[in-house]
Image (spheres, rainbow, N blue to C red):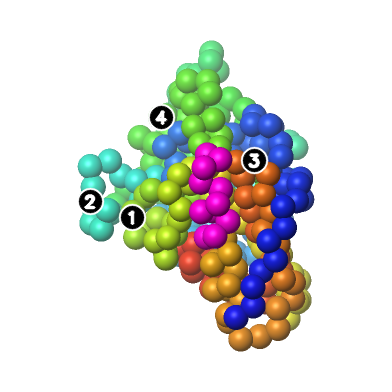
Amino acid sequence: MRTARLLLLCLALLGCGKPRGEGPDWIASAPPDAVAAISCRTDWAQDPTRMAALLQRYPPAGVALSLVLQRVQPELLRQAGRITLYLARRAGRPAAAGPSPRTLLQLGGFRLPGRIQTAIAQAFPETGIRTLDNRDLPSYVVLDLPSGQIRAMADPEGRIWLGDPADLAGIGTAPAGSGAASREPIPDLAPAPLQGFIRPGTPDPRLPGDQSGTLPAGTTALAWAVTPAQDPSSPVGFELALAGPDRSMDAAAAWLQRFADAVQSVPGQIPQVPEIQQVETRIGLKCQLNRVQLALAMERLGLPPVPGP
């Protein structure tokens, strides 16, 4: 088994040195109770089979997004925006029982969000209006299922949200400074076609998390990023970062070393030896993996497999 090189380098390589509050909007705008997120660039998500693969564990969200992508003009989704799935536990439910996790989808980061909103309004029937910050925010019927409803609504910043009406009611009402970025120090990785975060301490088999059950105590957040290759035979870029108090960094480094060793134990050529990089209260891993190794890495994080090019 190969051993990853442990290098104490500046986390600028991982994008983790930015002050809080300067992170990407899909993290800053995450619902306060979100325990995980999967975010992808809209140009990468243009292939519907990719989104279907990523959202197969969460059928209502997958069906709703498929309907939106079918009916909204494709060119409007080429504005370098992002599609983000947020996951949260359902209150009062045992971890191993009950319905699937609560889901919210966000379409954000577009240069011309008004055009996206207009396309949504033309594609789906209006079902009501909500007033927030002296602005009327209409909602639209996307999906009605026996198990629940999916509505679309724009927030005052122009993001489009898809979710259950009860969950959409909380959008834009959280107090300032209560979002995901302020509640947990989520490492800010460099932008990638596919990335996300996980808040540890959520022992629910339906939610992403450390499937090996060995995340070090004190870890407050985990971020990951994947840069798929156009050629299926080419290596895939992979980054992983953990945040926590200074006293947890030694344990976090050991966990990342075990993670790297496990991934490298898969037969096949190693495109790039992983580098473990640390600065203060954040530590991360950056490497290139082949497809088999990437599948193992995603599995260990409890995440869906990354669909091919």
Mark 3 crowdedness (10 Å alpha carbons): few <14, some 14-19, many ≥20:
few
* Quarter holding residue 287: bottom right
Q: Residue furthest bottom?
A: 267
The alpha-carbon separation of the residues under discs 1 and 2 comes to 8 Å
Amino acid type for the residue under numbered disc 1: Asp
Q: Position of residue 99 (x, y in %)?
A: 28, 54
Q: Earlier along the polypeptide chain: callout 1 or callout 2?
A: 2
Circle 1 residue: 204
Amino acid type for the residue under numbered disc 4: Ala
The alpha-carbon separation of the residues under discs 4 and 3 comes to 38 Å
229 left or right of 89? right
Report the residue at 45% width, 56% height from top.
Answer: 215
**Where, quadrant-wise, is the C terminus in this rendering?**
bottom right
Query: Please, is residue 139 above or below residue 104 in the view?
Result: above
**Tag 2, which secondary structure?**
loop
Circle 3 residue: 280
**Tag 1, which secondary structure?**
loop
Which numbered tag is attached to residue 169? 4
Out of 106 and 290, give the one closest to the viewer: 290
The alpha-carbon separation of the residues under discs 4 and 2 comes to 24 Å
| Highlighted range, magenta | 245-255
**Residue 247: within the magenta?**
yes
Q: Earlier along the polypeptide chain: callout 1 or callout 4?
A: 4
Circle 2 residue: 94
Amino acid type for the residue under numbered disc 2: Pro
Q: Earlier along the polypeptide chain: callout 3 or callout 1?
A: 1
The alpha-carbon separation of the residues under discs 1 and 4 comes to 25 Å
